[in-house]
Structures are given as structure tokens and as C-alpha cells.
Image: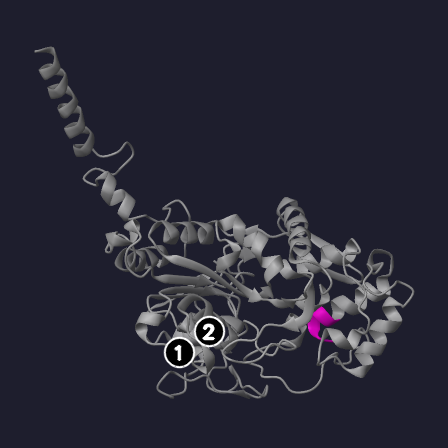
Amino acid sequence: MRMTFLRTAVAAVLVLSTALPAAGAPPGQSTVDSFRCPKLSSSLEWFGDNRQRLQRVIDERGSCSHPELLRGHGKRPVAAFDWDNTVTKNDITDLAIAWALKHDELLRPANWADTSPWLTEKAVRRLTEACGTDVPVGRPLRTSTNPACTDEIFSIREGAKLTSGENAFSGDWNRRRTVPQYAWVAQLFAGHTEAEVNAIARASRAAALAAPIGATQKVGSHTIHAYARYYPQMRDLITTLKRAGFDVWIDSAGAAPITEPWAAGVGIGGHRVIAIRNVLDRRGRITTTVKGCGGEPDGGGEDIPYVEGKRCWLNQEAFGVRGPAAWQRQDFAHRPVIVGGDANTDVSMVEDATGAHVVLNRNQNEVLCKAYDNADGRWVINPMFIEPLPRKEGSYPCASTGYVNPNGSLGPVRRDDGTVIPDQLDTVHAR
């Protein structure tokens, strides 16, 4: 009799435990439904109905409609995000370079010409003069006490100019696949291990997160931001996507060893970070050779994750597309669902999204022309979440000079069907 009573009681508890919703679950929503349908935080502010629009895509393409994703079955939908000024406020590469210069972390190259195939002879000569030759090759430059060297390096990084105002780079490169000063940053860390650059990035990250919003710093004679913040809305979006079964990637034109420690802060491991990656030597040290994409050979940085390079690298790494096909837009099943960016450098991967093209407004011509034209009705424009920009004066020059051609000339921005996008007004900005 006693055993029968115990079996009956246990059965009753089991029935109740499966029938009742979990504590905190909305009325009428079961624990299973809550687990299958992760929701973006309603306490974080988005512009207009952007949060609701993103939630619909997450529900349609994620575990809410495809519960098999929670069991590890089925093909996971892909989401991808640029990093600088998309997931974080401010540029983390500038922060890492500033830290490295202030703490003598850059190693003297045997010849500055080795650091980039596009450096001019004048740039090589000026760097050699400013940074000196007294430090042995492969040893740390004394940039913390040599403002001339610091100024020359940061001037090239910041604007591809020498301190004299002359161009630091010359020659031919595809403006939709690379920009020399971006590749040069990764090449400046030649001689270090990736772990050593990770440590530099973590140190600069800690300082930037501790600095108050709006703080600046001096790098030689240059004044740049001293702070960075993870956007809470973007952190929440990435977390929600992961809970909904999405495969989330970072696709950045920064250096991989700098980006990886920051990406870890939103739960994305280095195996899901696309960024500039240098070839390592036999000792595991960074070289000045940069990995190529889409069947292109490794080289001087001709094919970094930059504009069309971001599409190539995402197709190659996330979808396994090899060879020249990686440069092309793929079919619906082999494209990301949600992509976020803030600049023209992100436009190719952002427009490939099949569910939502997320753009944080930094008044960049090409990407905002596409976004405001909103040809497929899926563009989601949001002001920057911290220190958003005011309304752009005038209109975006979409019909004339909004597009950058491979040779650097300007032209009109076009839709997929070839028609020209008319000039667009800026309507999503700081209020």
C-alpha cells in the first residue's frame, strides 16, 4: 500500500512539473516555447520598430520555427557582423596600435619596405629616419620616447599620409578588396606571436572599457578616442541569435589577433572571427605575408575582408565556397540571414543578407544609399547607440558619386537590376 501511494505521488509531481510554465515565463507560454523562442530584451532601446522587425526574422529562421536546431539537427542559419562601430563603439585597432606605440610593442623591421608592397620610397625613407636604426632588427622600437617615430606610424595608419602630408602608398590595388593602411596594421606586428598580439589587445581593451565615454588620448601629436564600449543592443542581439540556433560570425577588416579578444566578450570564439590573418613562420611568428581569399594567393594584403573581400571571406569560411566563386553572391541557401555593419566597407556582405540588413548610421554614402532605397523592404537602419550622429545635411549622392569603383573612381550606386538609386535623405539619426 505504501509503495503504491509513493508511486502515485511521484507520478502526480511529474505531471505537474511538465504542465506548469517555468517561473517567470509569460502566461500561456510553456518552458519549451520560451526555450525555443529567445527574445530580444524589451528594456534595450532600438529606433522605431527595429527590435520587432529583427525579432520576426529570428523567430522565422531560428529555433522558434525550427526546433530541430536545438537538437543540433538541420543547417544552422548564419548571422555576421562587422566589429568596429557595429558591435563596439569606436575602433579597437586604433586602440591597440596606440597601446603598442605607448608601450614599445612594435618590433623594428629589417627594411620598412618589407611591411607593405605599396609603401612609397619616401615613406620608407621617412620611417627609417624617424624610427632610427640603433635598435637591432627584431627588437622593440622605442616609440614611447620617440614622438617622431610614433607620429609617422600613426599618421600612415590614420590617413595613409606622411606627417609631411604626402601619400604614404602608391601603385595599384582594388579599392573594393583592400586598403593598404588596414593591411599595414597587421603587418606592423610581424615578429610577434598571435598570443602576444592577443595580450596587447586585451590590455588596450581593459583600458578602453575603463575610460569614461568621450575620453580621448594623445598618440604622438594625434588625438584619438581613448574609450570603447560594447553596444548593449548588439550584445543582446548576438546572444539571442546564438540561443535561437544561429551560427554567428564576426567579419572585420581589423587584424585577427586584435579582434579575437574583443569578440570573446560577446561569446564568439576565434574560430568564428574573420579578420586579416597573416601567414606564420615555422616558429609560429607573424610574417608580413597576408592570407588571400577566393583562390587568390597569399601576398601583401590584396584580398582582406574589405567591401567585396568581406563577402569573399564569409562565403569561404562560413559556407565553404572555394575558389573564384567565393567572390560572387551565392544562392539563397548559402547566404547569411542577418548581417550588421556601419560603413561602405561592409556593404557587400550586408546586402547579401536574406532576412535583415542592419546598418548603424555613420553617414556612409554607398551603404546608406542601399539602406534608404530599401529595395527588398528588409533594411534596418539604426542610429549609433552611443553618441549618434545628427541628421546629415543635404542628401546622399547616390545617383552620382556614392559608389567607389575598383580603380578608386566614383560613380552612381545601382540596384541589383542595374537601375540607379536616386539621392536619399537622412531620416534615421540622433533625436
Provide residue 399's location: percent of width, then percent of height.
46, 86
Q: Which mark is residue 311?
A: 2
Q: Is residue 337 visible to us here?
A: yes
Quick one: which residue is furthest to the left in this view?
1
Q: Amino acid at mark 1?
A: Arg
Residue 44, numbered label: none
| Chief secondary structure of the magenta portion | helix
Query: What range of the chain is rendered magenta?
Result: 156-161
SS at mark 2?
helix
Question: How crowded is the residue under tag 1: few (<14 C-alpha within 10 Å), some, or many (20+)?
Answer: some
Residue 408's image quarter? Answer: bottom right
Q: Residue tagged by mark 1?
A: 329
Residue in front for this viewpoint, 172 or 162: 172
Image coloring type: one colour
Please provide percent x and percent y for residue 421: 41, 83
Whichever of labels 1 and 2 marks the residue nearer the N terminus, that label is 2
